[in-house]
DNA sequence: ACTGGCTGCCC
DNA sequence: ATTCTGC
DNA sequence: GCAGAATGGGCAGCCAGT
């Protein structure tokens, strides 16, 4: 198969929105691919080169790609940038720029060149390889190669759609559960597709959990009240929700591998966790999942996420492990001594987990209790919040570990989900961004917002906002902002960040956020010595507030007070 | 030797 | 992470 | 309700330029 043929499939896929039709086109593609091509076809269709746990990255995004496009075509970078801003898609930009014919490269050849780009160290060499690749592709092919490289393929196809298509290649959808299961256990859809093509259903049935192949993570749905939890689950397990990062830990004898929520390899970053797992878990082979966060072992306090995230590093690992030891709150057991635990009910997994773990500084079971009382859930939730935890998790007692899916077997409840208006913030819009992909068609993708500083009568940026408005609202917003458009930053706006379009600080919107954090990028509360403040997970919750003047927005002082009211750390 | 721009990945 | 949209 | 694609703050690592 040539890369041009693959590109033609991509073109057809992006024209349609019906997932049934997509699956049918993909079925055709997967049937046409040879056994030695099909894994590459799957990876490329997912916009990847390999499954995440292989740890291969392009290291190329829009800036480097624009440079390569410019050098390959002779079009000035400024011009490429202008085209990109206008189209919101670097693939289409490439197609518009490239006028030469391609060399009709095979799919395998292009795949190998892409892999070569990913493996090349040094920006200059990378760009040279990119130029070389681009020169061998037609504009039509470059469109998709570019999108794969910068990680925005945007076909509307994900792993779930490919699984549908794979089951269609076997005649009907009866076999889908087997394919799905194989994928959830090995997290490598290219491998599943290849085995299916080579060995049929029998080969698919042979997939089993293997230490060293991450299992796709189960995810939680959200609700906005304790009542809804009990309504949905009745008697259920309630756990604390810790603000750290999720880890899946594989142990095979003295060999340990650790994977992130997105199945990236993380073993080297956490020698303290590796050591604890080897030393304190008596089982020979086991797969565990938990939330890791930095703790002060003397006081038992949890460090905030901004501290914990510093443990995600390649260098000075031991020093940081000493200064900010991790505690892994283990909440699930997926595999034990050759036995697949994902199929067992939660309550059984939990029982085995508690038997397996001894309470140590690094490793312990997450806090959990079982209840059917809304009152008890509410009380635990309130307590969790005052202790500085993120919220709570609720789990269906008889549910298996539903790998790779988000459903109501697990439910999360966070403070910010509750509809109360107490924690929302009124901010002033000071500029906007053109946006990419679907948003580019609206002409706006996000806004820069600020709070008021009365002492200087200025507006200090606190966040960007890119979600919460419907498409219709984004369009309406842009129309209003264009009427107060400025050529330069307004003199009353204090910002370190740039925007595509500055506007008069006139319109107030209400936003929600999970937390206020210290910020190196925003000017709200920023002094010569101290960083500013920003919003964590900002989202719009109102359209323009006609009843508010810009000076009625929340003030920097109010933000600082809200920041101080937040529990920073938690005592056990 | 240092720094700022860029990138990938945590949430 | 949250949110919106098409199916 | 699922799946996919928009979007957020902010951390460390890489590397070219100084």
Image (spheres, coloured by chain):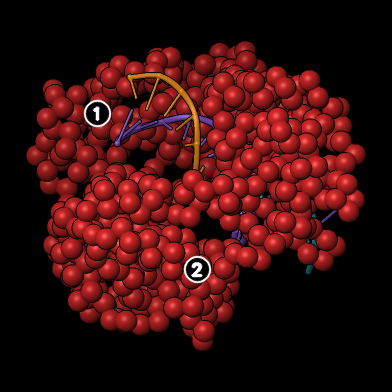
Chain colours: A red, B cyan, C orange, D purple
Q: How many marks?
A: 2
Q: Position of residue A179 (x, y in %)?
A: 19, 38
As drawn, A261 above or below A165: below
Question: According to the image, label 1 marks what residue?
Answer: A164
Question: How packed is label 2: few (under 14 Cα within 10 Å), some, or many (20 or more)?
Answer: some
As drawn, A293 above or below A443: below
- Which residue is found at the position 20% from the left and 44% from the top? A182
> In the image, A268: left or right of A165?
right
- Which residue is found at the position 41% from the left and 26% from the top? A156
Identify the image quadrant of residue A500: top right
> What chain letter is assigned to the residue under label 1?
A
Label 2 element class: helix
As drawn, A99 above or below A213: above
Label 1 element class: helix
Closest to the observer, A113 or C5: C5
The answer to whether residue A199 shows anywhere in this view is no
- Which residue is found at the position 28% from the left and 19% from the top? A20
Circle on res. A288: none
Question: How packed is label 1: few (under 14 Cα within 10 Å), some, or many (20 or more)?
Answer: many
> In the image, A527: left or right of A261?
right
Question: According to the image, label 2 marks what residue?
Answer: A386
């Amino acid at each position: 198969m040539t890369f041009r043929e693959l590109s033609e499939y991509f073109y057809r896929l992006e024209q349609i929105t019906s997932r049934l039709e997509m699956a049918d086109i993909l079925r055709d593609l997967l049937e046409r691919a040879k056994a030695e091509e099909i894994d590459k076809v799957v990876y490329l269709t997912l916009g990847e080169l390999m499954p995440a746990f292989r740890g291969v990255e392009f290291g190329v995004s829009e800036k480097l790609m624009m440079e390569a496009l410019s050098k390959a075509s002779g079009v000035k970078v400024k011009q490429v940038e202008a085209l990109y801003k206008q189209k919101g898609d670097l693939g289409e930009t490439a197609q518009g720029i490239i006028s030469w014919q391609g060399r009709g490269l095979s799919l395998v050849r292009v795949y190998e060149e892409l892999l070569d780009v990913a493996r090349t160290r040094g920006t200059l060499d990378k760009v040279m390889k990119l130029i070389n690749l681009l020169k061998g592709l037609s504009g039509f092919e470059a469109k998709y190669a570019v999108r794969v490289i910068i990680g925005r393929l945007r076909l509307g196809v994900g792993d779930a759609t490919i699984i549908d298509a794979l089951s269609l290649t076997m005649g009907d959808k009866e076999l889908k559960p087997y394919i799905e299961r194989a994928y959830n256990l090995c997290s490598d859809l290219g491998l599943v597709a290849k085995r299916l093509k080579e060995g049929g259903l029998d080969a698919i049935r042979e997939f089993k959990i293997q230490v060293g192949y991450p299992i796709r993570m189960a995810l939680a749905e959200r609700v906005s009240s304790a009542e809804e939890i009990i309504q949905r689950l009745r008697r259920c397990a309630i756990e604390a929700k810790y603000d750290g990062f999720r880890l899946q830990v594989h142990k095979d004898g003295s060999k340990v591998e650790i994977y992130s929520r997105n199945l990236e390899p993380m073993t080297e970053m956490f020698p303290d966790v590796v050591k604890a797992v080897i030393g304190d878990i008596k089982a020979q082979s086991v797969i565990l999942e938990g939330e890791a966060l930095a703790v002060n072992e003397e006081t038992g306090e949890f460090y905030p996420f901004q501290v914990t995230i510093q443990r995600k590093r390649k260098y000075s690992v031991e020093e940081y492990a000493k200064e900010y030891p991790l505690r892994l709150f283990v909440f699930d057991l997926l595999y034990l001594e050759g036995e697949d635990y994902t199929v067992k009910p939660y309550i059984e997994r939990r029982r085995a987990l508690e038997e397996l773990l001894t309470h140590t500084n690094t490793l312990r079971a997450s806090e959990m209790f079982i209840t059917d009382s809304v009152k008890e859930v509410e009380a635990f939730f309130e307590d969790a919040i005052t202790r500085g935890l993120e919220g709570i998790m609720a789990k269906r007692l008889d549910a298996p570990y539903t790998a790779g899916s988000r459903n109501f077997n697990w439910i999360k409840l966070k403070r910010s989900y509750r509809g109360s208006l107490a924690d929302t913030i009124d901010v002033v819009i000071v500029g906007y961004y053109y946006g990419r992909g679907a948003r580019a068609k609206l002409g706006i993708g996000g806004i820069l917002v600020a709070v008021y500083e009365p002492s200087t009568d200025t507006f200090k940026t606190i966040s960007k906002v890119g979600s919460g408005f419907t498409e219709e609202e984004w369009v309406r917003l842009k129309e209003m902002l264009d009427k107060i458009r400025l050529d330069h930053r307004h003199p009353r706006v204090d910002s370190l960040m740039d925007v595509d379009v500055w506007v008069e600080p006139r319109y107030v919107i209400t936003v929600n956020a999970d937390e206020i954090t210290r910020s190196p990028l925003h000017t709200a509360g920023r002094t010569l010595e101290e960083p500013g403040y920003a919003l964590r997970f900002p989202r719009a919750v109102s359209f323009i507030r006609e009843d508010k003047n810009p000076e009625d927005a929340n003030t920097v002082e109010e933000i600082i007070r809200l920041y101080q009211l937040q529990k920073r750390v938690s005592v056990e």
